[in-house]
Amino acid sequence: MKKIFFLLFAVLGLCAVAACSDNLSDVGATVRPEEDGMVIRNKNYDLNIQTVYRDSVYVRTGYPLLGTITDPEFGEISASYLAQFYANKETGLDVRDSYDSVTFDILRTSAPASLGYDWADFHYRSWDSICNNQIDSMTIRIYYQSFYGDSLTPMQVSIYSLNPDVDFSNLPESEFYSNNDFSELYTADKEHLLGTKAYTVANREVSDSVRNDENYMNYLEVKLDDMYKEEFFKMCVEAAIARDKSNPHHKDFTDIFADESKLRKSWLSGVCVKPTFGDGAVVKVYYTAIYFYYSSHHRYNPDGTLLRNERDDADSTYNVDHVAYFAVTPDVIQMSGIRFSDENKEDRLKDQKGTYISSPQGYYTSIDLPLGQIMHDIYNDPLRKDSSYFVNAANFYLKAYKPEGHLLSKTPVPTVLMVRSDSINTFFEKGMLPSSSTSCYAVYACDSVPKDSYIDPTEGIYYYNFGNISSVVTGLAEASGWDRSQPNSLKEWERVLRAKGELTMNQGIEDYCVKMAVIPVDVTTNPTYGTLLSVSNYILPTTTRLKKNSQRLQLIYTLDGTSEE
């Protein structure tokens, strides 16, 4: 029994050392307890890796990019996006129970008279109204949290209206890729131009006192044509009357905000936001919003009581300034368009010393995972006397070069996903999560560097540590037809693979490899419990270069070396 406990602690120790060490070649000498006959084996597998390029990335994301930047080594990146506006609590309020809303307390305005109705028919207080019966102005704001490039580079953005019949919810997933040109969804001409804005990412138009507020977020603001505010005001009036069931005329009007498709077709379907001048900065858009500025004139309190002047107890009135909005938040469907050009593409794909993982250009590293060779070695181990074996660990990490060069190449990819190369699109389109049996992810790290920022360290080991991926190794093998319960499992597995065309007649099971893609991803977790919530393609500009001839997988497995006598 003591021997067994010793064996278990030895296995755990081997796994821990393998996960952290930079040199796997001397780890895991064979352990053979004298009494129980169990054997722990250690094998290292050199992995073939290469750079692969995909010209389009699935970018159905809540945080699109905007801007243009050119890196001397990696070429140009230009990003635009499309967004649609959805009715939310601001546009769908019950105005009878709300004092301030996007419907501007329309039940207390004189606006119905402008629609051809006599004020007396509506039983409203004509002396409570929106000042001048109009919205003062309407703008589109683009909020952003982070950026890459020069914050003082002059840039320009143009915003176009989408076609009235556009509905993102009805588009197939194949439309949400970065090479989509959007040509059928909007028209880039003066008639559809909502506005332009010259800006710098630093946003120096805003005062320091405002920018230094802890709740401040950078934004660009583009003023819309008065036509849009006039149309929207009329829709708000009609919606407010339609919601007032006590009004005898409420059936004569339509609450446009109750039907999102009608709202988009009748007013503004959505926007296409694209860079039209400048080269030097890309921002990560947090959300896009339409803002309304207006003032209202009141004689009554929100509870319906008459206002009184404190000095002489006479009737009183007051004006209130309002700001209301509705937004495109991260949970709303958006479309991103990303253009990139790289004159060194062919040289990068043929690089004999290293491979690349980058975003949003679409470079990723392909790994040949030798599943057939692994299972062949276990089954044909000379110390294996029966069918008993156990894969203790498959320790794996990818060695990277020191980040160097220009902006993009000095910013490592923070997190990478390893998934079957033929399942990349399916993984992201279906919103899948790493399963631990067919996929996994790792975070960029650097060892032996005090106070390292991971951007330009001067020494150390740079890597992505996937840890123990034994469940991925066995899971992928099982998914491709391997069944350890069969007495002749290797031969049967070989037959299945040959029938699928994954092995030729001249190949044996030891030749079977699964191509795995290592892709930059953005991982979202629950801040309280650490639960993995989502994994999407990472689209901020980053690049990592991996060492090509020093990648290996360390396998540790246990055999029952006793005979069956």
Image (tube, rainbow, N blue to C red):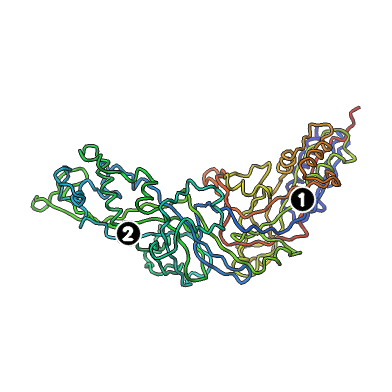
Inspect this view and state whether residue 503 appears. Answer: yes
Question: 169 or 535, which lies in front?
Answer: 169
x and y percentages locating residue 110 in the rendered image: 18, 50
* Left or right: 557, with 518 as reference point: right
Image coordinates of residue 122 in percent, x first then y, are 17, 43
Closer to us: 256 or 15: 256
Amino acid residing under circle 1: Leu
Where 142 falls versus 562 (above or below)? below
Asked whether 265 or 536 is in front, the reply is 265
Q: Looking at the image, tell me whether mark 2 or mark 1 is earlier in sequence order.
A: 2
Mark 1 Cα within 10 Å, few/some/many (few <14, many 20+)? many
How packed mark 2 is, by other alpha carbons closer than 10 Å (few <14, some 14-19, many 20 or more), is many
Q: Position of residue 486 (x, y in %)?
A: 80, 31
Relative to 358, 491 lies left or right? right
Disc 2 to disc 1, C-alpha distance: 59 Å
Residue depicted at 60% across the width and 66% down the height? 341
Q: Nearer the viewer, residue 99 or 335?
A: 335
Between disc 2 and disc 1, the foreground one is 2
Give the number of the disc on residue 553: 1
Res 76 label: none
Quadrant where the N terminus is found in the figure:
top right
Instruction: Place residue 83 in its image quadrant.
Output: bottom left
**Residue at coordinates 61% horizontally, 72% vertically from top-left?**
72
Residue beneath the point at 67% across and 68% down: 344
Q: Is residue 168 above or below residue 161?
A: above
Q: Quadrant of the C terminus?
A: top right
What residue is pinned by disc 2? 138
Three-letter code, disc 2: Met
Residue 350 x, y percent position in the rendering: 74, 64
Q: For the view shown, which residue lies furthest in the top direction?
A: 565
- 15 over 547 or under it: above or below: above
SS at circle 1: strand
